Image (cartoon, rainbow, N blue to C red):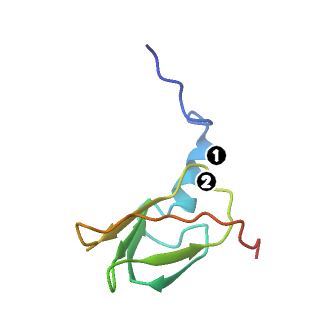
Amino acid sequence: MLQKPWEGQNNSLWLKKFIADFAVGGGQPGYTDEVTQGKLKEINYVMSLDAENGGATVLVKRYNLPHNLLVQVNGIPPNALPVATIGTGSNS
């Protein structure tokens, strides 16, 4: 069975947007984030956070990303329950 390609996968403009928006290779991503618990370790496609006091909290302002944002939190206790809240947020 053939897999359906990602939208725009063969489009060089889509690929350039993907690389820029997710800070692939380092740099600033296209979206704005604010870490309120934990510490931002790096953004290089995946947003990598270090936990603080058992968890991490980050606010990402609304932005039209070409793919889902992947978030990795390091240092979470093994008995912790993962919680993600998606809000409507502000466009600013």
Residue at 60% x, 67% y is 30
Q: Quadrant of the C terminus?
A: bottom right
Indicate the position of residue 90 as horizontal and vertical percent values: 75, 73
Q: Secondary structure at mark 2?
A: helix
Hey, which quadrant is residue 1 in on the image?
A: top left
Q: Residue at x 28, y 72 (%)?
A: 76
Position of 78 compared to 24: left or right?
A: left
Cα distance, mark 1 to mark 2? 6 Å
Q: In the displayed structure, does residue 34 sit left or right of residue 52?
A: right
Q: Which residue is mark 2?
A: 17
Rendered image: mark on residue 60? none
Q: Is residue 54 above or below residue 31?
A: below
Question: Of 11 and 3, which appears nearest the observer?
Answer: 3
Q: Residue furthest right?
A: 91
Taking the view exactly as shown, the residue that stands out farthest to the top is: 1
Q: Amino acid at mark 1?
A: Leu
Q: Which residue is mark 1?
A: 13
Q: Is 53 located above or below residue 55 in the figure?
A: below
Most foreground residue, 5 or 73:
73
Q: Quadrant of residue 6?
A: top right
Number of marks drawn: 2
